[in-house]
Amino acid sequence: MKKLLYLLVFIIVLALFRTDAYADESTKIYEHTMQDLGIAERHDISECRINQIVGDEVFFWTVKEGESWIFEKVEFYLIDLANDCKEIKIPFILEDTFVTDAYYSGEYIYILYHNEDDRQCILKIDKEGKTIADFMLKDIESGQTVYYIHPKADGAVLTSGRLGAAEFDTDGNKVWTVERSRGFYDSAYDGNDRLFCRDTGGFYEIDVNSGKLVHIETSADIMYARLYASAGKAYINFGDGIREYDGDWKNLKQKLFFYDYGLSGEMCAFSAEKDLIRFIDYDPFDPHTKVILHTIDFSKEGKKKQEILLLFPEYMPFPGEMYDIFDYYNRFSSDYYLLYSTYKSDEELGAFYADVRPDIVMMPDKDIRKHTDLVLDILPLMKKSNSLTPDSLLPAVKRNYTEGGSMYMLPIELSLETYVVRQSDYDKTGFTTDDYIEYLKRDGKLYTDCFLSKESAMKAVLETELGRFVNYDKKTCSFNSEEFKRLVNKIDGLYSENCYYADVELAPFTADDRILDDARISNFNFFSLKRKAFGGAVTAVGRPSAKSGKAVMSALCLAITTDSSSPEGAFDFLEYYSTHFTGVDREGTILANKEQFEISLEKLRSRLAINDYLFGKTTLISSKDIDTVMEVIDNSVAPKSGDEEVMEYVTYYTDKYFNGEMTLKEATTELQKTVAGYLRE
């Protein structure tokens, strides 16, 4: 029953993505022909080894167990793609032995097998099953097992495995050997003069004419890579797509050739000839799966799609839906093809404007605000769009991310830096700075893990109040004003003997003691957890401020770089992404797109009265919870580009006052002078 349910869900999700655009656009430049080869109907998939595509022929072999695991019955087949996928059985059977690998050259079949003495041999037969050659591989020590074979045009055989890499002549003698302590776990031969191999930590390029290593790259990325070669070229599959290797390893990760999608996510046969790319995908662990042939024809309309590169942080975990969006865009887009790569840290963003030259960057808004000189104002493009317009965003997003008639980033997923307060305590105060301090003075203790110091308290308040003291348009500030001095004194008074910092590990507390908690809200499910911790109803509120609490809105954003060779193509992807990403695997995700957010919200509302089927009975999210967060979103603010630098100056000088190193007048005078100079720069 569970399998039927999972299948139904899969079909529904697939149907959502297969829009009418598929019929029109899938037949263009990147043509994906998915054809059931019928192998699963004729054979047990778990017994099949689908090795190669040579021209219009698919080569595979079947293995059935004999009397013990090492004794087998092996048969060989060809499927003629040009003749209605007709299956042809090679009139040859190998029994009572163990076959490690087989290779089809288009004329001959080379079989790597163990003889009666458990020595590895090469058997060469033609398509009529006639034996052409049969010889043992000589000078192989115990344990130096060969895993893969690649015949050369002259009849010699290239090998890889525990022995490393080697060439054997037609008599089984070694011509050359490249030894590695760990051996090689995968290899591919380009048919010319290069053998490509990998072990758990390196990629190796070998000249087959001399047996010399000509290129070595060590990288953890290679550990799970698969190697392929066809028509004189090498290809590498890192699990997220195929890349054509052209001798430049450094930028290989930026050169996505095409996205690998399918049933198992791992190709078992690959062919690249001229403009036609073919690969076969199947799940060997599911005997009922189909064997799918994928075809990409680059010759359609006489040109390839224009490539656009997306760069995003390596540290940012993405759900499967994100990669599905990348894949579906490449399938349905008619003019552009999305490549993607990562950067490790903000310090490594030299690639942002140096070697990589991306078209699109995906990063937190605070990082993009540091680089507004390197990204385009997308507002002119949005005004021409039918789907991605300023009005297609949530009103608070439109307000927070449109500045001075420009918009440098497209927010995708929102996060609210705010507080969660027990409802009964919130009812006693409006949570303004003044009212909250008075409440603390009257009612005593505050247990919190938000304000760890007066410095962080100052930051928390000013993240929503900085506009009172800094005018970015006029490049002026008023930190020497009486208003700012009063705020500093209020923060100084906030920390009295009535305030405590409660850490779960260092100072355990009871639910009744705790009335305030900081929260970074990116969906609504946190309410259930907070409600348990607080022992009652909770509400989300903004930072303490002069008038009312406001949450600080931050976001994961997309931006188009000034270096983009195709701003129109980059915006085309922004449009597609904003209308297709739904956050379905995180219900209640706060999305910037108004329509998509409403869809997410409706899914959440439909679950209000349903217990979680995985975790049993849970405290359900209430409609009031949703209304509260909606109110917080509507009243949120987003820090402007200079906030981070200015905040450092503010906390530095006010901390001097809090610690008694400066008088309030000295601290605010120095602060005013420093920030005014910064703003003028």
Image (cartoon, rainbow, N blue to C red):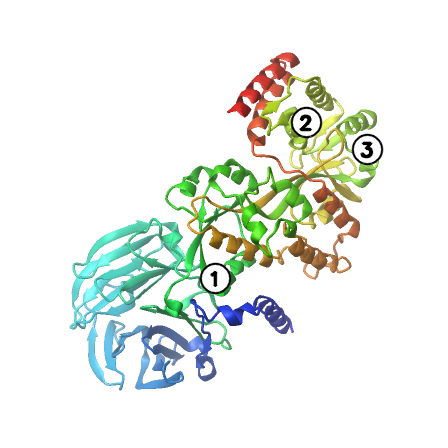
Residue under pointer 3? 429
Residue 550 visible here: yes
Q: CA–CA distance between discs 1 and 2?
A: 47 Å
The residue nearer to you, when weighing 507 against 423, is: 423
Residue labelled with disc 2: 468
Q: Considering only vertical position in the picture, is 202 above or below 644?
A: below
Q: CA distance from mark 3 to mark 2?
A: 23 Å
Q: Is residue 274 left or right of residue 452?
A: left
Q: Earlier in the sequence, mark 3 or mark 2?
A: 3
Question: Which numbered disc covers residue 150?
Answer: none
Residue type indicated by callout 3: Thr
Secondary-structure class at tag 2: helix
Examine the image and state in which quarter residue 661 appears: top right
Disc 3 crowd rating (10 Å Cα; few below 14, some 14-19, many 20+) is: some
Q: Position of residue 365 (x, y in %)?
A: 56, 41
Of badges 3 and 2, nearer the viewer stands 2
Q: Residue at x 51, y 56 (%)?
A: 572
| Residue 348 position within the rendered picture, expressed as x and y whole percent measured from the top left | 43, 39
